Image (tube, rainbow, N blue to C red):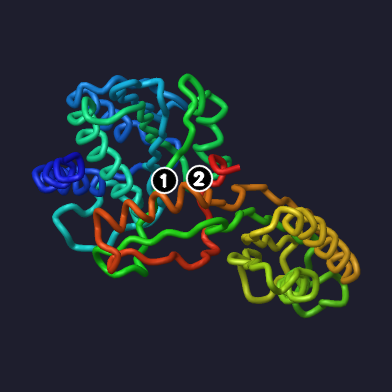
Amino acid sequence: MLKAKIKSLALQYQEEFIQVRNYLHAHPELSYQEFETSKYIQQKLTGFNIPFEVQATTGVVGLIQGKSPERRVIALRADMDALPISEENEVEYKSVNEGVMHACGHDVHTTCLLGASKILNELKDEWEGTVKLIFQPGEERNPGGASLMIKEGVLENPKPQAIFGMHVHPGLALGKLSFRKGRVMASADEIFITIKSKGGHAAAPHLTADTVLIASHLIVSLQQIISRNNNPTSPSVLSICSIQGGHTTNVIPREVKLKGTFRAMNEEWRRKAHLLIKKQSEELVHAMGAEADVLIDVGYPFVDNDPRLTEIGWQLANEYWGKENVEETELRMGAEDFGYYTH
């Protein structure tokens, strides 16, 4: 029985892929710089006798053909980039790359897809169709590796009828799986605002516009965009996460820079909010005697899981893992460029 064989091989290869994960965790690379990770994946696929090609510089696309390969094409996707974070864990697989860490689980995602690749390839005479393996770079940074790979034709030749991805979730108990139909993760846009005036001495604030004070008012004001303009039944978040300006105690700086993020689950509201953020920033800052440059870097769309495909995955998880270990994922305001594949 195929299910029994898959489980048996998964147990057989468990230690091998624990070591794969540990290697990947110890050798993280930033978005669009995953050169060694890409080489490692290519070496593994070569060892599995799985053909592949390189896309988007560091992306890798493998192909496994089972019986009747033209019957259906299913894509499996894993991201592989890390974050600019210094690892403080004292473990044998601690990051060897200073200031870079697999803090979002992409080492696990890549390991899971490599493991699935090996098992699927060994059992390819026992299932029908074609599986496309997508090892994707740059999930953590705009424009998103998914968008780049789509532009380079990852969803063509052959064209998948369905695509599945996964993400580790620290909120889940060990050994649990979760699914959610429909919208599950938010869109994400980056906000950059620069407030400008001529600057001046702190003892003579009347001779300039106080960029720090203006920035403070603007941060508070921006929170009203969601609370007064968005339908409260539609989740949305606007957070200003960085404020930079000045270098001493008695000089009002000429510039203060704000950086933040905007999240939404509705495209119409998303577009409206962009206009409101820009308008409110420019007008409030102008009213207080300064100028504002506003840039909104439009990022990933929300992730919208196909209900039918989600149900299929859910039921298979019940069969393989047991119903007691499968639950519904809560709506999350985190973002994932997997959203490009779902739109």
Q: Amino acid at mark 1?
A: Gly
Most foreground residue, 131 or 282: 131
Most foreground residue, 64 or 93: 64
Q: Which mark is residue 338?
A: 2
Q: Which mark is residue 252?
A: none
CA distance for labels 1 and 2: 7 Å
- Residue 228 located left or right of residue 298: right
Q: Residue at x 83, y 70 (%)?
A: 209
Q: Residue at x 45, y 52 (%)?
A: 310
Q: Secondary structure at mark 2?
A: loop
Residue 105 at x, y = what percent? 34, 53
- Residue 37 located left or right of residue 194: left
Which quarter of the rendered picture does the C terminus lie within? top right
Residue 333 at x, y = what percent? 55, 63
Q: Secondary structure at mark 1?
A: loop
Query: Where, by quadrant of the figure, is residue 253 drawn?
Result: bottom right
Mark found first going from the N terminus, 1 or 2: 1
Picture layout, residue 204 above or below residue 101: below
Picture layout, residue 72 above or below residue 279: above
Q: Residue at x 81, y 56 (%)?
A: 275
The residue under label 1 is: 165
Query: Where, by quadrant of the figure, is residue 6 drawn?
Result: top left
Q: Residue at x 25, y 51 (%)?
A: 95
> Residues at badges 1 and 2 in contact (C-beta under 8 Å)?
yes
Q: Amino acid at mark 2?
A: Phe
Q: Residues within 10 Å of mark 1 (few under 14, many from 20)?
A: some
Residue 106 at x, y = what percent? 35, 48
State whether residue 274 appears in this view: yes
